[in-house]
Image: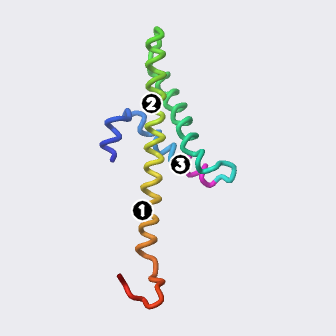
Amino acid sequence: MIENLKEYIKPELLSIVPVLYLCGMWMKQSTRIKDEKIPVLLGLIGILLSSIYTLSVTPLTDYRDVLSALFVSVTQGILCAGASVYWHQIVHQNFKANALINAPDTRENGDKD
């Protein structure tokens, strides 16, 4: 998976993924933020963080540079947010699968399939 991320997300922006993951975990524990809003909020935070980085390293000499920096910021922010949500789902599904595997057999007669 990491190799695929490197194809689409700039290596210097990969550090945003775990930051967004932690932000998502914090949001999930918050009672004020609904679960369905978390991916959108992570996307906005990802865009903001990638914009800060992109604008700090990109010389803006004309409108083309501004548009290019805006495009990079939006696409990289969304990709980082998507990767963090994907990472969360992998962890969540793995936890659920392990819980099912380790769960005691609750059938009445104890027969296994």
State the residue in front, 12 or 25: 25
Residue that carries the numbered disc 3 in the rendered image: 22
**Residue at the (47%, 52%) spot, across then down:** 88
State the residue in front, 31 or 10: 31
Task: Name the amino acid type tagged 2.
Answer: Thr
Image check: 32 left or right of 66?
right
Q: Which comes sooner in the sequence, label 2 or label 3?
A: 3
In the rendered image, residue 42, in percent from the top left (x then y), is placed at: 54, 41
Residue 107 drawn above or below residue 80: below
Residue 34 drawn above or below residue 74: below
Magenta span has 28? yes
Main secondary structure found in the magenta portion: helix
For the residues labelled 2 and 3, the Cα–Cα distance comes to: 20 Å
Its colouring scheme is rainbow
Q: Residue 75 carries which label?
A: 2
Magenta span has 93? no
State the residue in front, 112 or 77: 112
Q: Which circle, 2 or 3, is nearer the viewer?
A: 2
In the rendered image, residue 32, in percent from the top left (x then y), is placed at: 69, 49
Q: Which mark is residue 94?
A: 1
Task: Label 3, secondary structure: give it.
Answer: helix
Q: Which circle, 1 or 3, is nearer the viewer?
A: 1
Q: Residues within 10 Å of mark 1 (few under 14, many from 20)?
A: few
**Residue at the (39%, 88%) spot, across then down:** 111
Q: Which comes sooner in the sequence, label 1 or label 2?
A: 2
In the rendered image, residue 15, in percent from the top left (x then y), is placed at: 44, 40
Residue bounds of the magenta highlight: 23-29
Task: Name the amino acid type tagged 3.
Answer: Leu
For the residues labelled 1 and 2, the Cα–Cα distance comes to: 28 Å
